[in-house]
Amino acid sequence: VEETFYYKYPDESVGVRTVVGVEEVTHPPGVTLITAEDYQTRLAEIEAQRQADEAATRASEQSQRAEDYEALLAAGIPEATARRLSGHTPQEVQE
Amino acid sequence: LTNCGCSRRCTCAVTAGPGVTVDGNGSPSNPYIISAGGTGGAAIATACGLTGDGSTGTPLAVAVGVWPYPCDVDDAAAGVYCDSSGVLRGEPPVRSRFQQNSLGRSFPAAPLVPQPEEVVATLDLPIVNPDPCRTAMVILFQEVDADLNLPPNSEGGVGIDTDDMVHLANTGNSTISREHVQVNKLTNLTLAPGETRLHTMDINMSRGAGGATYTRIQATLRAWVISNPTT
């Protein structure tokens, strides 16, 4: 017999737990049992936040590389070398 | 024989039934002698599992097959037993069972990977030997997934119990987001007849540095319990 439980932890993390062949299921200390719908909603929020954080990190790092690239060009470094040193690639700007 | 007109000699007809012989004529000098039947004197009905007719030449016996195996019957054969109601019984059947506990946990706050080894999640499974007669072999599968965010010059690792199994480091100059690793172990346990044993698996992280974080941990315990006779 398979059973599925959805948890919300004190640190606001969420979990899905599936058990097979366990007669007496004990839940982790401190968790609140939530519905599948609440879990999916919360997971979607976490996922959206994660993607936003990653996009912000990526944009920041791309911006830093572009600055490095421009600084190297301004210092008279050949373009291909500036690109390799900075890690900046022109197509990054198009993302 | 008092009701069949007997005086000096019994006039009743005495007829031998199955498995019985009758001698004599009922006179005082030659009385009836009723005896059990001689060799094969009468067939004895038998159902499945018995052979013979009870005679000296073909005594009643348990019908058995020919031992077809290369091993020795005295050493290797299973037994036949009599239960409390007088019914023949064989060896107890072997039993098997599958159990699982799995968890997927997502962290909105993306905690830092700890530097000294630390338990970040725990999963347990009460493993049951369903056989009240035999010890059981347990094939235990333990699996952990971790998703790590690794900024430049960061590192971190994950493992099962005290065994560090994966270590990741980012020596580049851009962040690696949600680096995903999955590690697993296969091991064995032995359970006594009818025993239930709680197996606990710790998921550890260690060697965190440079702002490495984790965003998700998935873990699974699977147990196949088989009570085949083992040596």
Image (tube, coloured by chain):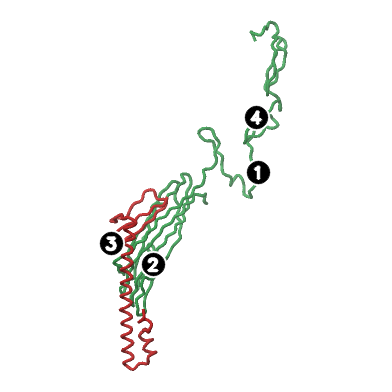
Distance, label 2 to label 4, CA atoms, is 72 Å
Label 1–label 4 contact, CB within 8 A: no
B167, above or below B53, in the image: below
**Residue B184: quadrant of the picture:** bottom left
* Residue drawn where x is 43% and y is 46% of the image: B194
Residue of label 1? B66
Left or right: B75, with B141 as reference point = right
Query: What secondary structure is found at the residue carrying circle 1?
Result: loop
Can you tell which of label 1 and label 3 is closer to the viewer? 3
Q: Position of residue B87 (x, y in %)?
A: 54, 34
Pinpoint residue A21: horizontal percent, then vertical percent.
42, 50
Tag 1: residue type? Val
* The N terminus of chain B - image quarter: top right
- Residue carrying label 2: B164
Residue type at tag 4: Ala
**Which residue is labeled 4 in the image?**
B45
Question: What is the drawing colour of chain B?
Answer: green
Distance between the alpha carbons at the discs numbered 1 and 2: 56 Å
Q: Is residue B223 left or right of residue B213?
A: right
Q: Residues within 10 Å of mark 2 (few under 14, many from 20)?
A: some
Upstream in sequence: badge 1 or badge 4: 4
Is residue B119 visible in the rendered image? The answer is no
On the same chain, marks 3 and 4? The answer is no
Residue B128 picture location, percent across and down: 42, 49
Please state if B6 lies on the left or on the right of B148 as rendered: right
The answer to whether A62 is drawn above or below residue B205 in the figure is below
